[in-house]
Amino acid sequence: MLQHPQIDPVALHLGPLSVHWYGLTYLAAFALFYVLARLRLKHQPFASVTQPAPWTMRDVEDLLFWGVLGVILGGRLGYVLFYKPAWYASHPLEIFAIWQGGMSFHGGMLGVILAMMLWAWKKQRPWLQVTDLVAPCVPTGLAAGRMGNFINGELWGRVASPDLPWGMVFRGAGDLPRHPSQIYQALLEGVLLFVLLWLYARQPRKTGQVSGAFLVGYGVMRFAVEFFREPDAHLGLLGLGLSMGQWLCVPMIAIGLGMWAWASRR
């Protein structure tokens, strides 16, 4: 039975400024996106697009800026609406207290989708072509975020069998060993999804197929790993014994399958 390491959430102090590990994982996520998106420009169809204009490094920089806004605003609003709507309705000013934690992946994804729609409209590019470029560059950032969750000792897993070699006791979660579900998510939704999606996207695909594959891949992996993650205490398990995260994955998988099938028939 392992003990979660007591890692100081503050990575370093710069005078009165405290730099948190969680913030550094966000920076790592954005840096990885920038590097991978530059590499994606060498893949088809982005390497040969001439209308309305060739893809450039400036486009990647613009997408990163818009994506950061989508992640932060969408992630926060998603958490407020999906997980604690009643509490934030009675404490509206707390919505802006992002430093206290509370971000939703599904909300962040919706925020990024909206940001990409606006950017595509502004640049007069096909929206699904934009999301096809972005999708394979996302999972490494998810892995970085989950490592931030692990460092903070938050979003731990459900109680595990005492025989589980990597069962871990998290501070604030009692004395029983638990699944380190943050690591599961980093490996599945991050590393594995990245490898599979990157290999799939390297070959020429019909517009929308890569985006659909991302939605299905993430939805399936998140749905599976939620069986090992402790449900939110204020929500518990919902209908059919599923967590909120699993219910949010259901439409994600359905839309992804529909998008991939639609793109394949075009």
Image (tube, rainbow, N blue to C red):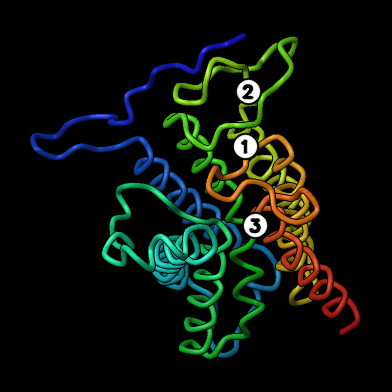
**Where residue 37 appears, x then y in whole percent?**
54, 60
Q: Which residue is mark 2?
A: 178
At 86% from the left edge and 85% from the top edge, which residue is drawn?
266
Residue 230: assigned label: 1
**Where residue 92 appears, x then y in whole percent?**
31, 67
Q: Looking at the image, which residue sits at the far left? A: 15
Q: Residues within 10 Å of mark 1 (few under 14, many from 20)?
A: some
Q: Looking at the image, which residue sits at the far right? A: 265
**Where residue 146 appears, x then y in whole percent?**
53, 39
Q: Quadrant of residue 44?
A: bottom right
Q: Secondary structure at mark 1?
A: loop
At 75% from the left edge and 56% from the top edge, which residue is drawn?
239
Q: Secondary structure at mark 2?
A: loop
**Where residue 162 appears, x then y in whole percent?**
71, 11
Disc nearest the viewer among 1 and 3 = 1
Disc nearest the viewer among 2 and 3 = 2
**In this picture, is 227 found above or below 247?**
above
Please state which of residues 246 and 20 is positioned toward the viewer in this rendering: 246
**In this picture, is 120 found above or below 6?**
below
**In this picture, is 86 found above or below 103?**
below
Q: Is residue 262 left or right of residue 52?
A: right
Q: Which residue is mark 3?
A: 136
Q: Earlier in the sequence, mark 1 or mark 3?
A: 3
Q: Earlier in the sequence, mark 2 or mark 1?
A: 2
